[in-house]
Image: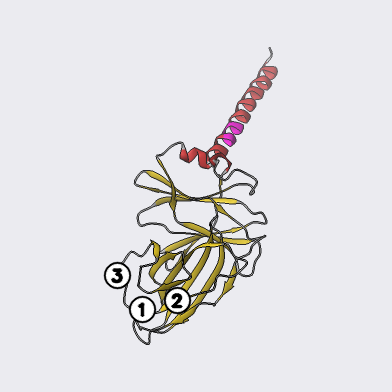
């Protein structure tokens, strides 16, 4: 073999090796992007991330995936299936997507922002004390069932420190649970509660089925101060059918 032929063969071999490495790296990267890859590495706690999703009020292809990041959690990730035809309980169908994340109520909650024309299944995950925690599958329904935005919350101030909030259950909605947030004028979350009922009294937890309020009891509402009530009506598949907000003064 002459020198020219030898160099040509050597270059061909090197090229093949590099090409093979590139393909392998692509496969490895794709596998690492799957939720199954993360599930296989750590102890798993399912259905332990509080999360839901809502459509944007104006842009039909934009969705917000809200979640509650408990204090101290790390490695927060967003996963989705290609569309809703995939098995929502099969983790190998969920691929991680890097998307914008922002604070809600000054970071007490957070949300991912996603633009997509397709409805999908979504899972949010994070690490807590060396254990992987994942949410229930969330079905994006922004094309078929966009979120209703309204201020239809009735506020009855029978006691300045314990107003009663109520709202209608709209006929076209399949809400299974309601999430209420009372916040101050700086947008700090004072209480975060869930009820099956279409009413809640600050701060009466008799009908509260899930509570994310950290400061107990929460701050007393002060007369003549401005506050807000935010409400989400959430379906069984964690889609927000109803998003309502209103301001009030005790």
Mark 1 Cα-neighbour bin, 10 Å: few <14, some 14–19, many ≥20: some
Asked whether the residues under the numbered discs 3 and 2 touch, taking CB atoms below 8 Å apart as contact, a structural biologist would say no
Give the SS element for disc 2.
strand
Toward which corner of the image does residue 141 lie, by quadrant?
A: bottom right
Instruction: Name the residue furthest left.
Output: 217
As drawn, 184 above or below 134: below
Dot 1 or dot 3: first in sequence order is: 1
Image location of residue 147, percent across then percent down: 60, 66
Give the SS element for disc 3.
loop
Q: CA distance from mark 3 to mark 2?
A: 18 Å
Instruction: Name the residue furthest bottom.
Output: 224
Toward which corner of the image does residue 92 lie, by quadrant?
A: top right
For the residues carrying marks 3 and 2, which lies nearer the camera in this image? 2
Horizontally, residue 122 falls left or right of residue 190, namely: right
Q: Main secondary structure of the magenta part?
A: helix
Q: Nearer the viewer, residue 81 or 176?
A: 176
**Quadrant position of the N terminus in the picture:** top right
Mark 3 Cα-neighbour bin, 10 Å: few <14, some 14–19, many ≥20: few
Dot 3 or dot 2: first in sequence order is: 2
Q: Is residue 78 magenta?
A: no
Q: Which residue is mark 1?
A: 162
Decide if residue 185 is in sight here: no
Q: Which residues are magenta?
A: 22-27
**Residue 217 got which mark?**
3
**Residue 165 got which mark?**
2
**Quadrant position of the C terminus in the picture:** bottom left
Image location of residue 139, percent across then percent down: 58, 54
């Amino acid at each position: 073999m002459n020198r020219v032929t030898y160099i040509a063969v050597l270059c061909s071999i090197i090229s093949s090796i590099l090409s093979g490495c590139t393909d392998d790296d692509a496969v490895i990267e794709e596998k690492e992007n799957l939720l199954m890859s993360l599930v296989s590495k750590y102890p798993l706690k399912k259905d332990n991330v509080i999360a839901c999703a809502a459509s944007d009020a104006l842009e039909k292809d934009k969705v917000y995936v809200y979640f509650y990041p408990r204090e101290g959690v790390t490695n927060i990730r967003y996963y989705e299936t290609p569309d809703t035809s995939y098995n929502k309980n099969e983790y190998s169908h969920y691929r991680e997507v890097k998307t914008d994340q922002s604070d809600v109520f000054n970071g007490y909650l957070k949300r991912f922002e996603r633009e997509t024309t397709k409805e999908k299944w979504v899972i949010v995950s994070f690490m807590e004390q060396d254990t992987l925690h994942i949410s229930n599958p969330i079905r994006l329904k922004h094309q078929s069932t966009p979120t209703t935005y309204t201020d239809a919350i009735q506020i009855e101030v029978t006691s300045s420190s314990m107003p009663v909030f109520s709202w209608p259950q709209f006929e076209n909605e399949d809400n299974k649970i309601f999430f209420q947030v009372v916040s101050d004028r700086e947008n700090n979350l004072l209480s975060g509660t869930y009820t099956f009922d279409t009413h809640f009294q600050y701060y009466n937890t008799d009908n509260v089925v899930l509570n994310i309020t950290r400061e107990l009891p929460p701050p007393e509402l002060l007369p003549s101060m401005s506050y807000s009530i935010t409400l989400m009506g959430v379906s069984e598949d964690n889609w927000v059918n109803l998003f309502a907000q209103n301001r009030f003064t005790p």
